[in-house]
Image (cartoon, rainbow, N blue to C red):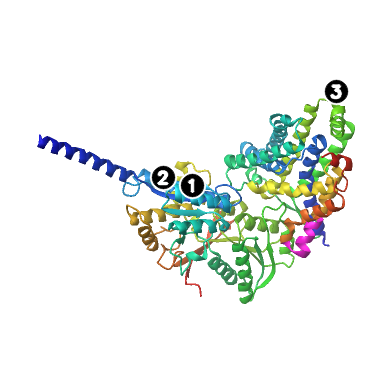
Amino acid sequence: MSIRIALGLAVAAAGIAAQVVAAQAADPYVVGVTAAMTGPAASTQAPVIEMLKVYVDRVNARGGIDGHPIKLIVEDDQAEPSKAAANGTKLIRQDGAIMLINSSLSSTYGPNVAEAKRANVPIWFAGAVCPKEAAPPADRLEYCSTGFDFSYDIPAGINYIKDVAQGTPKVALVGMPIPISRIGIDNAEKQAQSLGMTVVDKEFIAPPTADYTPFATKLIADKPDWGFSYGTWVIEIKAFEAMRRLGWTGSYLTYGHIQAEDELARVKDDKLTVFSANALFKDDLPIHHEIRDAATAAKISYPYTQGSEGWLTGMALESILQRTGWPVTTDKLVAAMESLNLDTKGLRGGPLVWTKDNHFRTRQYYRFYRWNSAANGIERVKDWIAVDVKPAS
Amino acid sequence: MSLQLVVNVVVLAAIYALVGVGYVVVYRASRVLNLAHGELMMVGAYLLVGTASLFAGSPVVAVLVAALCGLVMGVIVYVALMRWMTGQTVLAAVLVTIALGILLRGLVVLGFTAQQFYPAAMLGWRNQSIEVASGARISAASAMLLAVTVVVYGALFLFLRFTRLGIQLRATGQNALLAAQRGIGLNAVYAFAWGLSTFTASIAGMLLALDSGAEGQMATIGLKAFPAALVGGLDSFVGAIVGSIIVAMAEIAAIQYVNPLLSDVVPFLVLLVVLAVRPWGLFGSREQLDRV
């Protein structure tokens, strides 16, 4: 009898233990995302998150991270701070997100950062402007993997013009009335002048505008040799096209946001150069094939050429969660994030490295591309240049 | 003022006039302020994106089909939504148009995503630059927009003055009850007004998209044309033209001589000044506005 009871208890205990193990194995890593899936910033942010979802789905299809799937909960904030605030609270408090990913306008950062800190949850900016708190000396809970950052983009762009242009060129600058662009273009003006260039005009254009020609008229009035722009892609490219339609024949350099590759092929202008932190698909790397195939299979609604930033975010997320293990605690997660050393497989010029004091990256890389009419394709005009990221002085 | 600045003023005024005429048509006929007009213009641009992918080899067919769809869309908006506002307050009808605008923005994102589309490239059409005079240039799409604006206003003038339906539309706008008693079918007239308004808005959206692409934020351009229509007087076609020219001149002057960042607020500054001096607009009807 006692043996039967003992056996029964053992079987019952084993069953309960199995159920507990099964439940634990099925418990997901809950990752909250608040992003501008619609609204004025959606054309830049939505493709990032859509591709991130594709990546996460692939990880889950392979069994997740050590048996634990990643549950990505995406909330649309339409780039509105109030909606982002509500999303952040819901994702952390209600859904139990272990981290918050923000891919939206910088105006949404305040409430999200505040909520993340209250809950002691890391917040990661992906495909959106990097806050200065991610740069060294970094805040313990703030991280950024976004390719662009005006602090490094602007010097890289202006230096390129200086290197390529003959003598001391006349430059016209184009931006838009948002902080990152205004500060960036103001810095570009100072740097260009310090390098002996003449800044003939500086325009900040607010999208959408009915006609870009009035701005272009001013920009080309003093016959600049170069145009340089830094803002959203829409502003960057429309200002250029308006300048061209007025007969301007100079060269133009702009930051290559995620739309740049398709746009170079559409505009087909040999003097339009873009520089980007991410390698374009023109480079035809194995990882580009992987992204293209995954995007095609998932039937994403944006061109796969806009997928690098989201894919890279997915790679970094997988690496972080693998090293965090289960169960998740904020301390373990932060430790994994602070030791990220991601092989970007050529998507960037080197690994994406986060350290205890630097949650941005230790080196920033750029490649330069332009359209080549003779070859009827995009060509790389300058290979990776690397810039060391140092603490703000 | 250089010749290029004159061209810039003319083009911008044409944009506002072509978008603004839709506000006037609906307001004249039904006293309803259509605050979804910008969104309807944006949908017109996306209609061209849709037809451009269907008829990539035939730009003319693509534009005609999209324009026809724009006309039908306006009639559907009236039949499905605005007709049920008959007998309600004007405010209720205006609120319905606001809801319609939000709905259309959402539908566009659902149907087309948030990415930028270039129907000109899809149609294999190059938006060439045309030299109109020494040193002054205009894009082919802008030149077309200017020509279309002239044609639309000319056709409207002839239509309203010499055709039976045009006279019925004017009569309905002046006194709907009396018009109905004289046998004019109000629903048909209103449906036509909405169709015509959306048709012109769609054409404007298409031409803007041919010039610089279609995007979800285009609706804001429709909102900027609203002050131009109000400055001239909401029930006056001549006023819409004059208002557009005034607003365009002020905007270009702000960009050129003051601060480009003022270009967004200048139309509304002009509107405030005009409303303070002449609340019914430069060419608007005082008694008509009082009724609102």
Badge 2: chain ID: A
- Give amino acid for label 2: Asp
In which quadrant of the rendered image does the N terminus of chain A lie?
top left
Q: Residue at label 3?
A: B183
Residue A138 locus on image (x, y percent): 46, 67
- Give amino acid for label 3: Gly
Residue A92 locus on image (x, y percent): 45, 51
The structure residue drawn at horizontal position 51% and vertical position 49%, both measured from the top left corner, is: A87
- Give amino acid for label 1: Val
Q: Is residue A386 left or right of residue A163?
A: left
Is residue B165 visible to us here?
no
Q: Residues within 10 Å of mark 3 (few under 14, many from 20)?
A: few
The structure residue drawn at horizontal position 78% and vertical position 31%, both measured from the top left corner, is: B190
Q: Secondary structure at mark 1?
A: strand
**Residue A338 part of the magenta segment:** no
Q: Secondary structure at mark 3?
A: loop
The Cα atoms of the two marked residues, 3 and 2, are separated by: 64 Å
The structure residue drawn at horizontal position 72% and vertical position 67%, both measured from the top left corner, is: A223
Q: Residues within 10 Å of mark 2 (few under 14, many from 20)?
A: some
Q: Residue at label 1?
A: A74
What's drawn in magenta, residue-wise? B249-260
> What secondary structure is the magenta-colored segment mainly?
helix
Compared to residue A253, the image places residue B276 above or below, namely above
